[in-house]
């Protein structure tokens, strides 16, 4: 009971600090998170995870960002987090911002480390919820950006399952993942386009080809 009261009090303090930011932006919100990371550096992983759940329940993108970064920047907690914890932290994702925070801060690093199963991402690709389908793709971005050819094959396995998806949020995420892959593994990106050209959105084909040719998603037009 005492521990729960401590979590609620910390959550209220963080919420008040973020609410007072004029106006909130990533740098300002991160400064609040950094302060609490220092204060909670020696806390137990269980406290940090439950504090994250407390913040996420507030249904605020800024507080969700704080929650995810608190977990990611507390090494004992990040080492301790389970797939079940991650799925609970994804409760309520309903915008590109909330999805991309989850994927880039937590699920992406966990998947790249092999701590989030491929089967879980594959299940997300068949979700009726567009945001979980987007989450599956954005989770692959870090591995696409930094991984070797084996990681690239894992990325493409997920991307293939959503190659025909026409939802705009999913299409944009698919383009992002393949563009990141193209930086270090252009042959894999070209092969993906060739294999799925009949079902891919024209946006994906255009943006990935631009990236392959020019290094830019949208080349600048001459003045």
Image: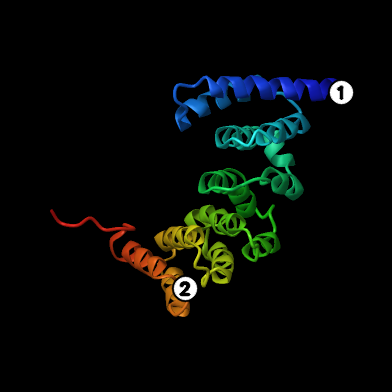
Disc 2 to disc 1: CB gap under 8 Å: no
- Residue 208, relative to residue 76: is it above or below? below
Q: Is residue 41 visible?
A: no
Q: Which residue is mark 1?
A: 1
How many labels, in total? 2
Q: Is residue 65 visible?
A: yes
Real-space Cα separation, disc 2 to disc 1, in angstroms = 54 Å
State the residue at coordinates (65%, 45%).
92
Per the image, label 2 sits on a secondary structure element best described as: helix
State the residue at coordinates (71%, 36%).
53
Circle 2 or circle 1, nearest the eye: 1
User: Seen in the image, is 189 located left or right of residue 165?
Assistant: left
- Mark 2 or 1 closer to N-term? 1
Q: Which residue is mark 2?
A: 192
The residue closer to the viewer here, 95 or 4, is 95
Crowding at dot 1, Cα within 10 Å, few <14 / some 14-19 / many 20+, comes out as few
Per the image, label 1 sits on a secondary structure element best described as: loop
Q: Give the numbered dot on residue 209.
A: none
User: Seen in the image, is 168 located left or right of residue 91?
Assistant: left
The residue closer to the viewer here, 181 or 128, is 128
Q: Quadrant of residue 1?
A: top right
- Residue 62, relative to residue 93: is it above or below? above
**Position in image of residue 86 (x %, y %):** 70, 46
State the residue at coordinates (78%, 33%).
46
Crowding at dot 2, Cα within 10 Å, few <14 / some 14-19 / many 20+, comes out as some
Which residue is most to the left?
A: 223
**Position in image of residue 181 (x %, y %):** 46, 61
Q: Quadrant of residue 23?
A: top left
């Amino acid at each position: 009971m005492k521990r729960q009261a401590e979590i609620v009090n910390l959550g209220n303090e963080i919420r008040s600090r973020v609410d007072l930011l004029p106006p909130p932006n990533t740098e300002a919100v991160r400064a609040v998170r950094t302060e609490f990371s220092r204060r909670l550096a020696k806390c137990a992983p269980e406290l940090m995870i439950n504090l994250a759940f407390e913040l996420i329940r507030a249904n605020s993108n800024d507080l969700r960002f704080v929650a995810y970064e608190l977990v990611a920047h507390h090494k004992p907690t990040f080492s301790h987090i389970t797939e079940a914890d991650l799925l609970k932290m994804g409760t309520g994702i309903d915008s590109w911002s909330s999805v991309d925070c989850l994927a880039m801060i937590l699920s992406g690093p966990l998947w790249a480390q092999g701590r989030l199963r491929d089967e879980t991402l594959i299940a997300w690709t068949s979700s009726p919820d567009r945001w979980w389908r987007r989450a599956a793709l954005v989770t692959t971005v870090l591995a696409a950006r930094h991984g070797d050819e084996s990681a690239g094959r894992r990325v493409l396995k997920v991307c293939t399952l959503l190659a025909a998806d026409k939802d705009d949020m999913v299409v944009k995420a698919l383009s992002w993942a393949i563009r990141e892959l193209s930086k270090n593994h252009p042959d894999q990106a070209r092969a993906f386009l060739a294999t799925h050209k009949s079902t891919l959105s024209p946006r994906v084909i255009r943006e990935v080809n631009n990236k392959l040719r020019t290094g830019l998603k949208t080349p600048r037009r001459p003045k």
